[in-house]
């Protein structure tokens, strides 16, 4: 596997445009595995064929031309409002640690230039379609952008949803100070709807770019961030995990219950708005489907289980067919006579979209249930409907204790020895084998941080002949655990290999921290794009948290030496 320098190809924008059909879905970085494909004669060379390359190159040139024509955004300095003095709280060490943590995060945002960089990127996008912009309007935009950044960081740090964080923000002077809401007069805090808009303030690509530059700054000038040593960009430990979707366990007949509930609750809303069509009370359908679900659950303890389950499913299927016909009539009624309701057209579109999402998948869900229960046939994973509300959820076979199979999306992570996340990717479609991910990750890290990577460690799932040859040709120390036990015994004679193999288990702990301490275990975000954005905010918050801990450890050491 022969690698060539990544810098030969101007692909930093192409990587955010190209998509492929090789199992990685519509991702911004799908061409990036092609970076190492272009650097090798064996590993996924077909992913960056001529047509894809020249299409991406033309987009890149067009993007650069547009950037040259765009006006340059300038951050306007303005006098902030006089904040209230934080109250002195004694007797609670947890509060003091949390206060110090927020103050460290605030210092990191300022001294690293991360806040200014994201403000600049937001203003650049904001002024693109505006011919004339007043200073007052830009100042308002800057204020909201600063609050959006800090509110998102604080919310992910506390693992709060929008409603819970809005209430906590109104109740906490400390959070108000960090989110730049504190002032001498009345304090106006963002509502849950405003916090939701803040969550989508920047795209995932901007957050990734800002985080990469933060790590680069910490590697080049650690004293600027208050660190004792430079951020290590030379060593990376790789691993994958399942980012579980916020869905119930996918059972075929439960999908029929979900469809009935969504459609009938939508019908109830329409009837409350005065749109009525001749039918039974919608509540009666909800009662009947719940009764059938209870009967289906109890059928397991009865004799002749299969016959009983088939009888109940046929009753469910007939009921769902009736529900579908009523829902389709009400859907047409709303589309044609929405002006007779108190809703605006966008509000009506929300209800129409909710009904269309279920009506479109209902025939397949009914056929899937009939195939599984009536015919006794298996349904291929790629054809299964796991959730009516999350179409991008995949079946991930983990073969681990307590998690033989999980439902969600595969998340790839690359961590350095200090616990900072250097690279990540969330897969929309079924992820390829772990061994395929090494090339793409090395290419992304070398493009983001330069040719600084010197060692890679991972478990045996990442091992392959192509990866061994590629890492060797690049001069990168291969700490990937080999699949062959004989090869493992042979390589254990190297102290470098042992040094890379020993701390590899810390990546499992890092995954647990992301899932349990930062809310990445089961996200509430709906839709793949929102989950991908939430992952970016989670990793940004996590890395800032790690840097704040490193700063705090250095400050405590200095304080101890001074006291001695």
Image: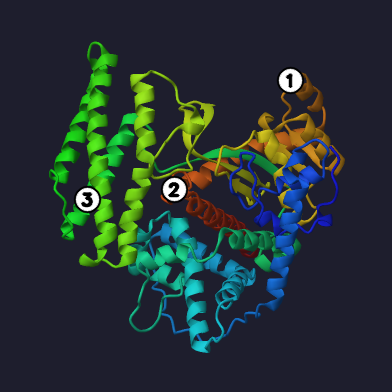
Q: Quadrant of residue 210?
A: bottom right
Residue 418 seen in render: yes
Image quarter in which the N terminus is found: top right
Q: Quadrant of residue 185?
A: bottom left
Q: Which circle's residue, 3 or 1, is located before the other in the chain?
A: 3
The local crowd at label 3, few if under 14, some if 14 to 19, many if 20 or more residues have their Cα within 10 Å, is many
The residue that disc 1 covers is 485
Q: Quadrant of residue 491?
A: top right
Label 1 sits on a secondary structure element that is helix
Label 2 sits on a secondary structure element that is loop
Residue drawn at (66%, 40%), measured in percent from left and top?
238
The residue that disc 2 covers is 523
The local crowd at label 1, few if under 14, some if 14 to 19, many if 20 or more residues have their Cα within 10 Å, is few
Considering every residue shown, the one lying at the far top of the view is: 303
Foreground tag (3 vs 1): 3
Point out residue 423 in the picture as x, y percentages from the top left corner. Answer: 65, 50
The residue that disc 3 covers is 267
């Amino acid at each position: 596997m022969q690698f060539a320098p990544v810098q030969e190809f101007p692909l930093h924008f192409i990587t955010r445009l190209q998509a492929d059909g090789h199992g990685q879905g519509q991702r911004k970085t799908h061409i990036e595995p092609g970076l190492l494909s272009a650097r090798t004669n064996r590993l996924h060379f077909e992913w960056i064929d001529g047509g894809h390359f020249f299409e991406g190159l033309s987009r890149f040139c067009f993007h650069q031309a547009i950037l040259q024509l765009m006006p340059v955004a300038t951050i306007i300095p303005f006098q902030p409002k006089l904040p209230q003095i934080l109250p002195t709280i004694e007797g609670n060490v947890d509060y003091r640690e949390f206060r110090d943590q927020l103050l460290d995060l605030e210092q990191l945002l300022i001294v690293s230039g991360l806040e200014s960089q994201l403000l600049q990127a937001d203003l650049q996008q904001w002024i693109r379609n505006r011919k004339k912009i007043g200073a007052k309007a830009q100042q308002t935009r800057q204020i909201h952008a600063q609050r959006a950044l800090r509110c998102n960081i604080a919310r992910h740090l506390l693992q709060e949803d929008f409603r819970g964080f809005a209430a906590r923000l109104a109740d906490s002077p400390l959070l108000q100070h960090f989110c730049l809401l504190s002032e001498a007069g009345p304090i106006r805090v963002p509502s849950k709807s405003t916090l939701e808009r803040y969550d989508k303030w920047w795209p995932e690509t901007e957050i990734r770019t800002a985080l990469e530059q933060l790590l680069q700054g910490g590697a080049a000038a650690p004293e600027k961030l208050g660190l004792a040593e430079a951020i290590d960009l030379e060593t990376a430990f790789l691993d994958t995990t399942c980012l579980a979707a916020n869905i119930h366990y996918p059972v075929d007949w439960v999908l029929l219950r979900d469809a009935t509930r969504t459609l009938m609750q939508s019908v109830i809303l329409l009837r409350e708005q005065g749109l009525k069509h001749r039918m039974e009370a919608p509540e009666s359908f909800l009662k009947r489907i719940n009764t059938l679900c209870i009967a289906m659950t109890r059928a397991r303890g009865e004799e002749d289980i299969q016959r009983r389950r088939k009888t109940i499913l046929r009753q469910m299927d007939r009921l769902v067919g009736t529900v579908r016909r009523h829902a389709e009539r009400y859907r047409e009624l709303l589309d044609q006579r929405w002006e007779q309701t108190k809703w605006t057209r966008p509000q009506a579109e929300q209800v129409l979209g909710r009904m269309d999402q279920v009506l479109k998948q209902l025939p397949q869900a009914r056929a899937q249930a009939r195939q599984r229960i009536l015919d006794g046939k298996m349904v291929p994973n790629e054809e299964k409907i796991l959730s009516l509300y999350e179409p991008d959820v995949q079946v991930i076979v983990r073969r681990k204790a307590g998690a033989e199979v999980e439902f969600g999306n595969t998340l790839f992570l690359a961590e350095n020895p200090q616990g900072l996340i250097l690279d990540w990717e969330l897969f929309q479609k079924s992820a390829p084998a772990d061994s395929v991910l090494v090339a793409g990750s090395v290419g992304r890290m070398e493009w983001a941080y330069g040719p600084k990577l010197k060692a890679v460690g991972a478990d045996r799932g990442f091992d392959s002949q192509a990866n061994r040859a590629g890492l060797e040709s690049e001069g990168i120390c291969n700490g990937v655990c080999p699949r062959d036990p004989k090869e493992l015994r042979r390589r254990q004679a190297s102290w470098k290999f042992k040094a890379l193999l020993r701390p590899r288990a810390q990546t499992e702990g890092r995954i647990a921290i992301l899932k349990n301490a930062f809310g990445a275990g089961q996200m509430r975000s709906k839709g793949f794009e929102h989950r991908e954005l939430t992952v970016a905010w989670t990793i940004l918050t996590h890395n800032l948290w790690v840097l704040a801990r490193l700063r705090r450890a250095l400050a405590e050491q200095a304080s101890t030496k001074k006291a001695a």
